[in-house]
Image (cartoon, rainbow, N blue to C red):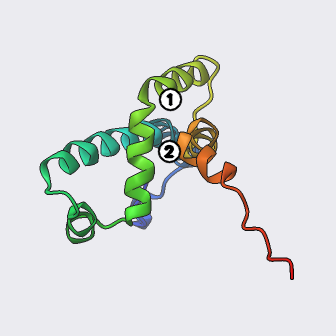
Amino acid sequence: MRIDSDPACTPTAQDLLAAAQRDHEEAERAAQSTVEKCIAAGKNLSAAKKLIPHGFFEEHVAANCRFTMGTAQKYMRLARREAVFLQLIEQKRSVGLHLTMREALKLLNKLSPEAKAIKRKPKAEGLVS
């Protein structure tokens, strides 16, 4: 929050502390809603993908969004697991915590069949002469 620098309106310590508290509360609200907003973005991306001809989705994301295709894919993966994440968000809120994007993506990688398939992919064996 901006406090005017007009000397006639010099803020008191109490004013500054109140402003700091309001800023803190705003930051907490933003942090709490981050994963939910990413899920909403993923749902919109998934819906848009169904409307775009096959093979052109990446091109449309690049032309219309200011984030990468990798980010779009993460958001859509979060949206596919929406119920799991909303339950976890509520569990964390009930004890005064919030789910960070880092935690959500880490969990997503554990839950994701795509990630498991990549990890299970056999390594290429060297040729023996």
- Is the residue marked by circle 2 packed among few (<14), some (14-19), or many (20+) residues within 10 Å? few
Residue 27 is labelled as 2
Cα–Cα span, label 1 and label 2 = 20 Å
**How far across and how far down the image is residue 47, in percent?**
21, 42
**Amino acid under disc 2:** Ala
State which quadrant residue 121 falls in. Answer: bottom right
Number of marks in the rendered image: 2
**How far across and how far down the image is residue 5, in percent?**
43, 66
Q: Secondary structure at mark 2?
A: helix
State which quadrant residue 63 falls in. Answer: bottom left
Disc on the earlier residue, 1 or 2: 2
Q: Residue at x 23, y 69 (%)?
A: 59
Please say if the residues under marks 1 and 2 sit with CB atoms less than 8 Å apart: no
Q: Which residue is mark 1?
A: 85
Determine whether, in the image, residue 71 is placed left or right of residue 54: right
Q: Is residue 81 above or below residue 83?
A: below
Q: Residue at x 23, y 60 (%)?
A: 57
**Amino acid under disc 1:** Phe
